[in-house]
Amino acid sequence: MNIRTRTALAVGSVALGSAGILSAGPATAAPASATAVPAQAAADRGEVRAGSGNASRTLWTSNRAGSISIKWTWHSSADGKTYYGSYSGKFYDHKLDKKYVLLQAKWQGKGWTTIRTAANGENFKGDYSKLKGLNFRACLQGGNCGAAAW
């Protein structure tokens, strides 16, 4: 495994697995499934709605030098208070400048946190659990963070 790919991130009692979730870039993000935004928006307000869903996006850095193709799923947990799911995707360095492309995630109660980094063409995947309000974005090494996925 490339040293630039992070295999897991544990924050408190919440762990994001080896998968990555990406953020949508300016005006180029593919639309999520019909249930993606309402369920996640409700989760961002601290609500959890029963059910499940999936979404996919292409997340761009603000300078369009890098992007991340990402897919993720979510399911309401048995406790009815959080979600669990999985994510996977691929990193792209469009300028081939050897700068890292970063996948960042944010969930209720936390700020943006880098959960995966990789070189051009590298794949990632992972799982998450016990989260509310999960969101993703793409950044380039040194800044240039793009828009959030939703």
Image (cartoon, rainbow, N blue to C red):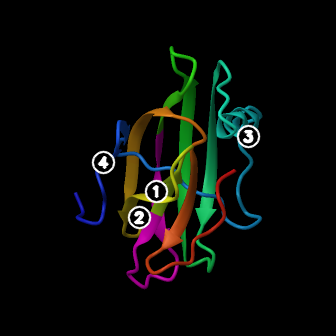
Single out the mark in the foreground, 1 or 3: 3
Q: Tag 3, which secondary structure?
A: helix
Percent across and percent down for residue 112 are 51, 59
Percent across and percent down for residue 16 are 39, 42
Numbered circle sitting on residue 121 = 2
Q: Determine the CA span between mark 1 and mark 3.
A: 22 Å
Q: Determine the CA span between mark 1 and mark 4.
A: 16 Å
- Which residue was labeled with disc 1? 90
Query: In this picture, is 88 found above or below 84?
Result: below
Q: Tag 2, which secondary structure?
A: loop
The answer to whether mark 2 and mark 1 are in CB contact below 8 A is yes
Which amino acid type is marked by label 1? Lys
Earlier residue among tags 2 and 1: 1
Earlier residue among tags 4 and 3: 4
Q: Residue furthest top?
A: 78
- Which residue was labeled with disc 4? 8
Single out the mark in the foreground, 2 or 4: 4
Q: Quadrant of residue 117?
A: bottom left
